[in-house]
Amino acid sequence: MILYHGTNVDIEVIDLAKGLQYKDFGKGFYLTPDRNTAIRMAQKKARLFGGTPTLITYEFDDTAMKSNLKVKVFPEKATTEWFLFVDANRNRKNTKTIHDFDVVIGPIADDGVVLQITNYHEGIYSPEEAAKLLQDKYLDQQYYLGTEQALAFLRKIKVESV
């Protein structure tokens, strides 16, 4: 399977320690099967931090899904379980790791999702209501690789400026 990572520099070796803690699925390496989504991420990162918008193409060995890795796959649409999982991982009050999955696959929490998380925390919506409001919204998909064991199934095949 082909996956993309949008960034502002080429990545020679993936260092999980450099990942940011409070992301959708926690600290790890993120990819998407959608080339255009990765290009947008590369352009945003270069705009914010400098560098050159860079698209890195990887091949992810599908046998990972049937290996001994711990894998969590969310539906492509927002669900209450996904909403609460993202909320827990993004919550800066949580100082401990939220999960021990090697791979997590599911929707990317965009600005609309962040708004609903805020509404949930302010008591405007329950998690179920917030997830339901997001059901008709297309959310790009992401792959989170959180361990060296998961990264072993990833092979870089191309780097290009975008």
Image (spheres, rainbow, N blue to C red):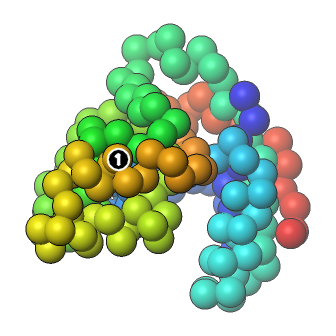
The residue that appears at 72% across and 28% down in the rendered structure is: 1
Could you say which is closer to the camera, residue 148 or residue 81?
A: 81
Asked if one can make out residue 19 in the rendered structure from this viewpoint, the answer is no
**For the C terminus, which image quadrant?**
bottom right
Asked if residue 16 is positioned above or below residue 101 in the image, the reply reads below
Q: What SS does tag 1 mark?
A: helix
Q: Residue 94 at what x, y percent from top left?
A: 14, 62
To which quarter of the image does residue 17 belong? Answer: bottom left
What amino acid is labelled 1 in the image? Lys
From the viewer's perspective, tell me whether residue 87 is left or right of residue 47. Answer: left
The residue that appears at 32% across and 65% down in the rendered structure is: 116
Q: Which residue is mark 1?
A: 132
From the viewer's perspective, tell me whether residue 142 is left or right of residue 125. Answer: right
The residue that appears at 42% across and 52% down in the rendered structure is: 134
Q: Residue 107 at what x, y percent from top left?
A: 49, 46
The residue that appears at 83% across and 56% down in the rendered structure is: 159
From the viewer's perspective, tell me whether residue 128 is left or right of residue 56. Answer: left
Asked if residue 2 is positioned above or below residue 161 in the image, the reply reads above
To which quarter of the image does residue 114 belong? Answer: bottom left
Asked if residue 64 is positioned above or below residue 145 in the image, the reply reads above
To which quarter of the image does residue 147 belong? Answer: top left
Q: Residue 70 at what x, y percent from top left?
A: 36, 24
Asked if one can make out residue 48 in the rendered structure from this viewpoint, the answer is yes
Q: Residue 122 at what x, y percent from top left?
A: 15, 73
From the viewer's perspective, tell me whether residue 127 is left or right of residue 101. Answer: left
